[in-house]
Image: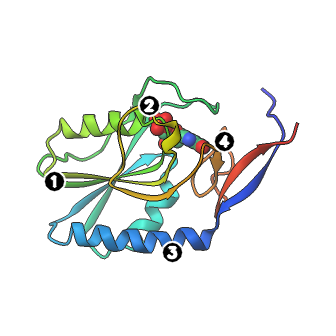
Amino acid sequence: MTQRPYVIDEMISAKAIAARIETLAHAIRAEFHDTDKLVVVGLLRGSFVFIADLVRDLDLPIEVDFLEASSYGDATESSREVRILKDLRGAIEGRDVLVVEDIVDTGFTLSHVIHLLKSRKPARLKTIALLDKPSRREVDIRADWIGFEIPDEFVVGYGIDFAQRNRNLPFIGKVRFTD
Ligand code: IMP
């Protein structure tokens, strides 16, 4: 399949992301200051850059685990079916858990993951999303911490892809088709 031509316009700079993560990490440290060992769960693949930066600002005992859920193909439209492609390695019963998501769009992915993880009886389950597109929401859900609220634009960079490309951009940019 050939890709429509597009350019990427910077929306959130690397510097703005770093500053925001520092503030978020401060709030997370306050919430989990009494935690024995926090399980930080990254939702693959889009959160891999965010989680890497976030955990380095968390001066807490943590372990890192990953979960892969899919609601997207290689297109810009979300489907409603959420499948677990890769489950956690560790048990979370009785543990404090922080789920790290890249973007909450329709909300189907995060709501499905929360439902699944809650069924495993964690002591505390909190969620953080780097980006939130509230205007796209179809499920009534909101992450406990949000980096940036953004309009209904398709974005890439800082771990987030468009058809598996552009994850390695250091900033968040919006896709603008040029054809
Ligand atoms: P939701 O289930 O509709 O909330 O979709 C969440 C997932 O869709 C995110 O974790 C992303 O992987 C993907 N997604 C949503 N919006 C965008 C976007 O603008 N660019 C790239 N991926 C997106």
Q: Are marks 2 and 3 in contact (CB under 8 Å)?
A: no
Q: Where is residue 17 in the image (x, y as percent from the top left)?
A: 54, 67
Labels 4 and 1: the sequence-earlier one: 1
Labels 1 and 2: the sequence-earlier one: 1
> Which dot, 4 or 2, sits closer to the camera?
2
Labels 2 and 3: the sequence-earlier one: 3
Q: Which amino acid does label 1 sit on?
A: Arg
Task: Choose top left, top right, bottom left or bottom right for residue 157.
Answer: bottom right
What residue is shown with label 2? 138
Q: What residue type is labelled 3?
A: Ala
Q: Which residue of the protein is positioned furthest toward the right in this rendering?
A: 179
Q: How crowded is mark 4: few (under 14 residues within 10 Å), some or many (20 or more)?
A: some
Return the residue nearer the eye: 148 or 112.
148
What residue is shown with label 3? 19
Q: Do the residues labelled 4 and 1 touch (CB within 8 Å)?
A: no
C-alpha distance separating marks 1 and 3: 29 Å
The secondary structure type at the circle numbered 2 is loop
The secondary structure type at the circle numbered 1 is loop
Would residue 127 appear left or right of 72 to someone viewing this image? left
C-alpha distance separating marks 3 and 4: 25 Å
Q: Are marks 1 and 3 in contact (CB under 8 Å)?
A: no
Q: Residues within 10 Å of mark 3 (few under 14, many from 20)?
A: few
What residue is shown with label 4? 162
Labels 3 and 4: the sequence-earlier one: 3
